[in-house]
Image: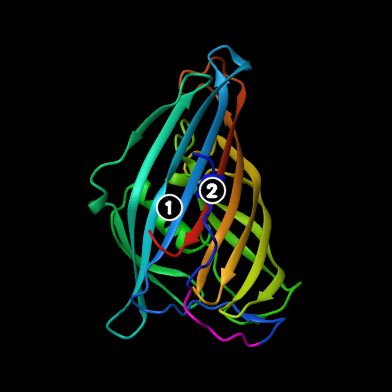
Amino acid sequence: MTFRALVPALLLGVPLSAAWGQDSVLLRFEPVFDIPVHRLFQSHTRLVLPGAAGNTAVQTRETVDMGGFVQVALSGPSGDPVVHLAFDSLRTRMRDGAEPWREFAWTGLDTLWVQAWPGADLTIRRTEGDRSPAAAILVHLLAGMPDLTLPGRWVRPGERWLQMLDIPLSGVVARGAGPLPDESLLARTDVRVDSIVARPSDTLAYVSLGGVFEPQRSAVDPGVRYDGTVSGSLIWSTGWSGWVSGASRVVVRARLRGQREGQMGEGEVTVRLESTTRYQARSSP
């Protein structure tokens, strides 16, 4: 399945929301309760690491997760939103090197659900439900990408803000991470509002982001050093009060010292991790 096959007509039948102005939009999470939002997604992770012969030979491992899920905001005890996230479908394809793809469909999806308590800026204050790596993408896509929050104010094209994103190496963002420790990395990220489009039913804000992982050592294993980049483009809808389309890419380079996971030699080796996630909202299952 390609991402083109995942893209239906965008935003048909969205809830109505008045636009404050042609050139401004309020980036604040204020969902309409009990209205389901369906999303299709695809997350592709590629791991490149030295082969048994050393740095002159490499081996690759690819994992693709694809499927759909439904998001429903409910009113909590204090009136604040509680968001229920559950898979409609989930399939995974995997391969090593140039081998044929292996694909399987997940079963037991009724247990792969998460409830999240987001703030108005989409800060996830707590979650309940499944804690497996497979369910992690549900919370990630609610936020647009891991740890992304909103400024909670009116913004115009050209406005930007700086954010430190805490990107996890575990979970769907880095499936098949192999020799890398299970931890999170901080990325200094610039978020920018590129343009705003007012429509009869809602207002769209086109947002781009770019950042770098400042060179850092692993908090789990001091022998591992990281750097890399983060990039993405997202669309916020006031009608949906959420991200309705997005594509993000995370590239991590990890320099490992010594022998690991069957690698030969005692010198430093480099592991490269590339993860690309795309998603699109749709009005019906």
Report the colour scheme.
rainbow
Compared with residue 18, is residue 59 higher up or lower down, i.e. above or below? Answer: above
Compared with residue 59, is residue 222 higher up or lower down, i.e. above or below? Answer: below
Question: Residue visible at 32% across and 60% down?
Answer: 114
Image quarter of residue 125 = bottom left
Question: Residue visible at 31% across and 86% down?
Answer: 78
**Spatial distance from mark 2 to mark 1, Cα to Cα?**
10 Å
Given contact means CB atoms under 8 Å apart, are the residues at marks 2 and 1 in contact? yes
Q: Nearer the viewer, residue 156 or 121?
A: 156
Query: Label 2 belongs to which residue?
Result: 277
Compared with residue 175, is residue 31 higher up or lower down, i.e. above or below? Answer: below
Question: Residue visible at 37% across and 77% down?
Answer: 81
Q: Is residue 266 magenta?
A: no
Q: Nearer the viewer, residue 5 or 56?
A: 5
* Residue type, label 2: Thr
Magenta region: which residues?
A: 14-20
- Image position, residue 157 (x, y; %): 74, 74
- Image position, residue 241 (x, y; %): 50, 75
Q: Earlier in the sequence, mark 2 or mark 1?
A: 1
- Image position, residue 145 (x, y; %): 53, 57
Query: Label 1 belongs to which residue?
Result: 137
* Residue type, label 1: Ile
Q: Is residue 17 magenta?
A: yes
- Left or right, 116 with respect to 55, comes to left
Image quarter of residue 142 = bottom left
Q: Nearer the viewer, residue 92 or 273?
A: 92
- Under tag 1, what secondary structure? helix
Q: Nearer the viewer, residue 140 or 57?
A: 140
